[in-house]
Amino acid sequence: MEANPGEMHVVAAGFVHFEEARAAEAELRATLDVAGADIAVREVGGSHEFVNGFHVVLAGRIREGVLAKVHAVFHRHAGEVLTDVPEAWAWSKADLGA
């Protein structure tokens, strides 16, 4: 797949502590052009096997051209990237009206 700096990706990172996720969110908002509704921090629910020790997730829509910076922010705040896929992959053909 050819890189497209303007293509949106759906990314998520897991964090053990809420404060780490909030710090990463604040850094992303301060340093990147991220719209208010494009990223959010939420508590993780599910079985212990599913959450893998993470209690909080920071997820959002991020332009492909800044993904490396976003991953670095996640890691700097003790987050682990859980998913990073083109936004188009996140929608079914039915969702798109196809």
Image: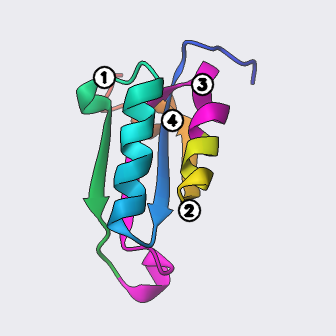
* Highlighted magenta segment, given as a residue range: 47-70
Distance from label 4 to label 2 (Cα)? 27 Å
Distance from label 3 to label 1 (Cα)? 14 Å
Give whichever of discs 1 and 4 has the lower sequence position: 1
Q: Secondary structure at mark 4?
A: helix
Q: Is residue 65 above or below residue 26?
A: above
Badge 3 density bin: few <14, some 14–19, many ≥20, Cα 10 Å = some
32 sits left or right of 71 in the view: left
Name the mark nearer the viewer: 1 or 2. 2
Name the mark nearer the viewer: 3 or 4. 3
- Quick check: can you spot residue 60? no
Give whichever of discs 2 and 3 has the lower sequence position: 3
Q: Secondary structure at mark 1?
A: loop
- Under mark 4, the amino acid is Trp
Q: Quick one: 7 or 95, which is closer to the camera? A: 7
Q: Quadrant of the C terminus?
A: top left
Q: Which mark is residue 89?
A: 4
Q: Is residue 16 magenta?
A: no
- Under mark 2, the amino acid is Ala
17 sits left or right of 63 in the view: left
Distance from label 1 to label 4 (Cα)? 21 Å
Give whichever of discs 1 and 2 has the lower sequence position: 1
The residue positioned 42% from the left and 87% from the top of the image is: 48
Q: Are marks 2 and 3 in contact (CB under 8 Å)?
A: no
Give whichever of discs 3 and 4 has the lower sequence position: 3
- Under mark 1, the amino acid is Ala
Q: Which residue is mark 1?
A: 35
Name the mark nearer the viewer: 1 or 4. 1
Q: Which residue is mark 2?
A: 78
Q: Which residue is mark 3?
A: 66
- Under mark 3, the amino acid is Val
Q: Are marks 3 and 1 in contact (CB under 8 Å)?
A: no
